[in-house]
Image: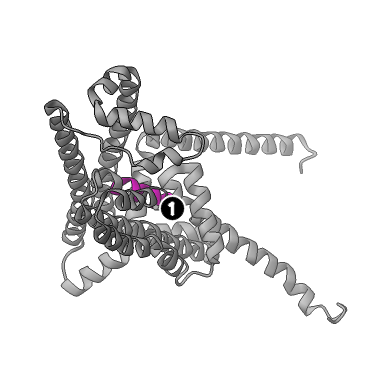
Amino acid sequence: MIETEKGRAEVTRFTIDVAVRLGLIATIVYVSLLLLQPVAPLMLWAIILSVAVFPLFNLVRRRLHVRDGLAAALFSVLLLVLLLTPVVILAGSAIDSLDAYARMLLRGEHVVPPPPESVRDWPMVGKRVYEFWLNGSNDIRALVTTHVGQLASAGRWIGRIAAGVFLEVLQFAGAIIVAGILLAYSDELLETVRGLAGRVADKRGRHFLEIAGSTIRNVSQGVIGIALLQSALLGIGMLVAGVPFAGPITFVCLVLAIVQVGPNIIMIPVIIWSWMYLPALHAGLFTVYTLPLLLLDNVLRPILMARGLPTPMAVILAGVICGTLAGGLIGLFVGPVVLSVFYDLLVAWIASGARPEEGDASAPSA
């Protein structure tokens, strides 16, 4: 049929129709992604939040017998309170600390405590650090005047970081509101996503969807939840012990715990500071309280992250670390999901290749 003139014309027309349709679909998809690009991080965060809290949302609406919209609104308000309360407390603590040090500087008081004599014995840099520290302790105004350029640069750098954090908080608050809207229509959206997954990969597509949801929930509990608990307890300990700048240090501990670095690199110097400037009893109690908290994530995180998942803990942890390095905080969730699905695909592919050999009568026995 193709050899005839009419057959070739039909093939040509069919090819042109397919090319036009694919071009139109590709154009629509490209323009849609281009339009969604400015809000893509917000939407991705909203999806992650809605998936993470969906089991609790489902439990509340069934037990309390409330409508989906009301339950979603309650969850949105609760999440906003959980987000904004620590931010307001940390910001207030930082402002109060800076204001107190500024007043001390205006009154001519000692803002920087004198260095201990043991600093002299530090290798290579001990003498210079001791002299610089001592000058700052005796006359902080002269030190500020001498290094005004460096301090201005540091201030601008800190200001850029603070502005970035403020924008991230606003974006996260917007994501919480969008997540509440997604939860209000969760049943319809869930059926749509399941149908799409089944359309793409049949039963295995729905299985991948379950893996993705379980991974997001486990990572949110094992990483975000443990980081919040750990940093909150460390912050309470520093406030009780009277550690200066306890609010900013707590925020840094939270960020370090989320990105899988851990708060040890900042809390160990704080413990050393407590033994240098606090009474021995207070420093001992602070150390006994802090050291177990620094090991808290190493104990609880593996238990929560691998609970109920067929994916090994090593794969999830690799996804968390690599995703964070590649995509920041969003990569913290995207990385484990991608590696979990890839691992499941790899296992299924290996199993499908091994089945014919197991059933082959001519295969040599082990």
Residue ID at (22%, 72%):
62
State the scheme by which the image is colored: one colour
Q: Main secondary structure of the magenta part?
A: helix
Q: Quadrant of residue 128?
A: top left
Q: Nearer the viewer, residue 346 or 29?
A: 346
The segment highlighted magenta reads 250-262
- Identify the residue at image location x=27%, y=48%: 277
Using the image, determine if residue 130 lies above or below residue 323: above
Residue 256 image point, x, y percent = 39, 48
User: Vertical placement of 36 versus 269: above or below?
Assistant: above
Q: Quadrant of the C terminus?
A: bottom right
Q: Which residue is more in the foreground, 347 or 294?
A: 294
Please provide percent x and percent y for residue 61. 21, 68
Closest to the observer, 267 or 14: 267
163 sits left or right of 37 in the view:
left
What residue type is disc 1 on? Phe
292 sits left or right of 208 in the view: left
Which SS class for mark 1? helix
Q: Position of residue 22 (x, y in %)?
A: 56, 38
Residue at 24% over, 55% down: 279
- Please name the residue that numbered disc 1 is placed on: 333
Indicate whether residue 261 is drawn in magenta: yes
